[in-house]
Amino acid sequence: MWIALGIIVFVLLVGVLIYNGLVRLNVRVDEAWSDITVQLKRRADLIPNLINTVKGYAAHEKTVFENVTAARSAMLNVKGPAEAGKVENQFQQTMKSLFAVAEAYPDLKANENFKSLQAELTDTEDKIQAARRFYNGSARDLNTKIKTIPTSILANMLGFKIREFFGVDETEAAKISNPTDVKF
């Protein structure tokens, strides 16, 4: 009887440890996703200032500004990592266009306001990449736990789900690798 009771206690203890580990990883993934959304919001908040600075020098580049504004709006409305990855790639393309326009205006490149905004945007991009790596690492750890035995048994019973990675799909990867074509 003591042996049976010991086995039951051991199984319950292992179950609690596995469950707590899964919860901890799940919370880490949620936290990492939150970090990404904070940085995406920060970048979206910088964009109007950058656009207004560039607009003063390049008023006739209306399409570029419209595309950047649309990309900014899309970034604010992402629902998950897969959608965020796709929108992120489109955003990168529109930002290339904006900076290509800026290259055409030497006075703009020398403008302190533009330099400051560009530096802030670069810093934010670095933070997004760090948050993205942290998220993907956390998702990897959770997904590994969910897929390995004996954790997978308890994870499936308790409804833990595999998390998507924040990445670039193949069609978007091809777009990123091509330089932006800006015509005046």
Image (spheres, rainbow, N blue to C red):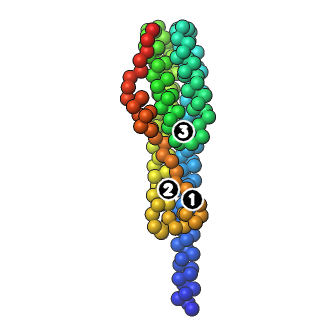
Q: Looking at the rendering, in which quadrant would you find the C terminus?
A: top left
Q: Which structural element holds mark 2?
A: helix
Residue 159 percent coordinates (x, y): 59, 60
Residue at image point 57% right, 48% down = 31
Residue 181 percent coordinates (x, y): 41, 18
Residue at image point 49% right, 42% down = 166
Q: Which structural element holds mark 3?
A: helix
Residue 148 percent coordinates (x, y): 45, 63
Q: How many numbered tags mark residues here? A: 3
Question: Which residue lies under the disc numbered 3?
Answer: 83
User: What's under tag 2, amino acid-wise?
Assistant: Leu
In this rendering, is residue 51 above or below 144?
above
- Label drawn at residue 142: 2
Front one among 98 and 79:
79
The CA span between labels 3 and 1 is: 21 Å
Q: Which structural element holds mark 1?
A: loop
Contact check, label 2 and label 1, Cβ < 8 Å: yes
Front one among 28 and 64:
64
The CA span between labels 2 and 1 is: 9 Å
Q: Looking at the image, which residue sits at the far bottom?
A: 1
For residue 42, say whether it is visible: no
User: What's under tag 3, amino acid-wise?
Assistant: Glu
In this rendering, is residue 65 above or below 91?
above
Contact check, label 3 and label 1, Cβ < 8 Å: no
